[in-house]
Image (cartoon, rainbow, N blue to C red):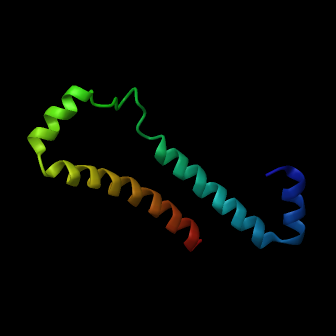
Amino acid sequence: MDDTTRLWLERHDPHHLHCVDRDQHALRRILQWCEAYELKYCPPIPEERLAEIAELLQDDMGKLHAGWARHLLDGIAKIAREALDD
């Protein structure tokens, strides 16, 4: 948000300014959460290994993917919930 808009909101609508600040903070935290697993630290599994792993896990591969997705969504939901409860 530019300085002029911030000054106007401070004077005329401080509650709205608080909401904008809260939302921007939440979005920054979500971005940090999304960027937490950098490829240089967590490289993707090569395709040939994925086939081997899928064969070993058989029906549990879907559960594994769902678990990873749940972990990510739980983190994002926590950030959003904290911002909305503010």
Residue depicted at 27% across the width and 50% down the height: 65
Q: Position of residue 42 (x, y in %)?
A: 34, 32
For residue 16, above or below residue 68: below
Left or right of 28 in this view: 64: left
Q: Which of 61 and 6 is in front in this view?
A: 61
Q: Position of residue 80 (x, y in %)?
A: 52, 64
Quarter of the image holding residue 47? top left
Q: How many marks?
A: 0
Quarter placement of the C terminus: bottom right
Q: Position of residue 54 (x, y in %)?
A: 16, 40
Residue depicted at 62% across the width and 55% down the height: 25
Quarter of the image holding residue 4? bottom right
Q: Position of residue 72 (x, y in %)?
A: 39, 53
Left or right of 16 in this view: 27: left
Q: Nearer the viewer, residue 25 or 52?
A: 52
For residue 84, above or below residue 53: below
Residue depicted at 12% across the width and 44% down the height: 57
For residue 47, above or below residue 26: above
